[in-house]
Image (tube, helix red, strand yellow):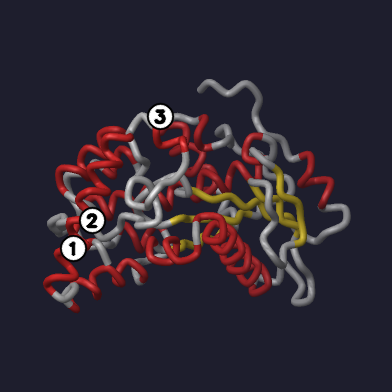
Amino acid sequence: MVVHQLPTRTLELSALSAHPLVLGVDDCGRGAIVGPIFAAAVCLPLHWTSPSPIADSKLLSASERRAALSALRAARVPWASAMVSPTQIDAWGHGVSTLYAMRLAASRLSRRLRRANLLAADASPFCIVDGDTLPVGFVGEAIPHADRHETCVAAASLLARSCHEAAMSAIGRRHAGFGFETTNGHPSAEHLDRVVELGPCAAHRASCFPFAIQHGRRMAYHPQRGVYEKVQRELRVAAALDRIEGGLSEAWRREREGTKVLGHDQEAWKEEGEGVEQTTTFKEWLK
């Protein structure tokens, strides 16, 4: 493990002097171009010490992440997750979708803590959020790279990533050929080449590169400019064919909307069917 300094509980313990509980909140999947965005909220026991390093999930190897997750589960650390579907991300944008997922995860965990009589009905936990914006209604603080400074946020990053990886594995089984299980939906060169060859799948985000129209000088020097131009050309052809043939079938509309109703937690994603669905043409995906 190459971690220069493990996170501490400095801000968390300081906040506990004025607040009943402290939650760490983080997200995963914002940088992907396919699948949902997940968020997780965690409440660490006051005197708990993990036998495995708890750090930013991006700084740990796969085996270290598994060990850290096992430590969190063994201690029965309270946590909750939430997701926003690709269709909702296209409608709201990545920023709003991320904040909504964080708020929903924290609200779910707060309700669980109240049911367990660990949080008073009229009390609000103090939330430490990874990022530069505090979701509306939160009492707390937003800190860029908080998952590298605060242990509770690092734990949230591990759990959010675990949910996101399970989701991408399920989507990868549905839509074979893209390598979602290894890329986790990020726009790697291999992933973009698969999009050009196979066309997008129902879980791709229409608001993301290379599907959304890009403006400005950045595209003139973009390393994947060729892929972007090919995809945009295919989309223009598909739009023309769609106008000529009278639009998409209702069955495909249901498939596109179906991305909304998939499970929101890790176990639900693991239970998704093992059947592999064929990828679609640009015309079928367009709407």
Per the image, label 3 sits on a secondary structure element best described as helix
Residue at mark 1 to residue at mark 2: CA–CA distance: 6 Å
Q: Earlier in the sequence, mark 3 or mark 2?
A: 3
From the top left corner, tell me how far across and down residue 124 is, in percent.
Answer: 76, 67
Q: Give the residue type that dot 3 points to.
A: Tyr
Q: Nearer the viewer, residue 182 or 111?
A: 182
From the top left corner, tell me how far across and down residue 229 is, in percent.
Answer: 27, 41
Q: Nearer the viewer, residue 92 or 127?
A: 92
Residue visible at 49% across and 44% down in the picture: 69
Residue visible at 65% across and 55% down in the picture: 43
The residue under label 2 is 236
Which numbered marker is on residue 221?
A: 3
Q: Quadrant of residue 248?
A: bottom left
Do the residues bearing badges 1 and 2 touch, measured as CB atoms within 8 Å? yes
Q: In the image, 100: left or right of 137?
A: left
Residue at mark 3 to residue at mark 2: CA–CA distance: 22 Å
Q: Give the residue type that dot 1 points to.
A: Ala
Q: Nearer the viewer, residue 183 or 21?
A: 183
The residue under label 1 is 240
Residue at mark 1 to residue at mark 3: CA–CA distance: 29 Å
Per the image, label 1 sits on a secondary structure element best described as helix
Mark 3 neighbour density, 10 Å: few (under 14) some (14–19) many (20 or more): few
Per the image, label 2 sits on a secondary structure element best described as helix
Residue visible at 29% across and 33% down in the picture: 189
Residue visible at 47% across and 32% down in the picture: 64
From the top left corner, tell me how far across and down residue 180 is, in percent.
Answer: 28, 44
Mark 1 neighbour density, 10 Å: few (under 14) some (14–19) many (20 or more): few
In this view, 204 is above or below 258: above
Q: In the image, 209: left or right of 155?
A: left
Q: Quadrant of residue 183?
A: top left
Q: Give the residue type that dot 2 points to.
A: Arg
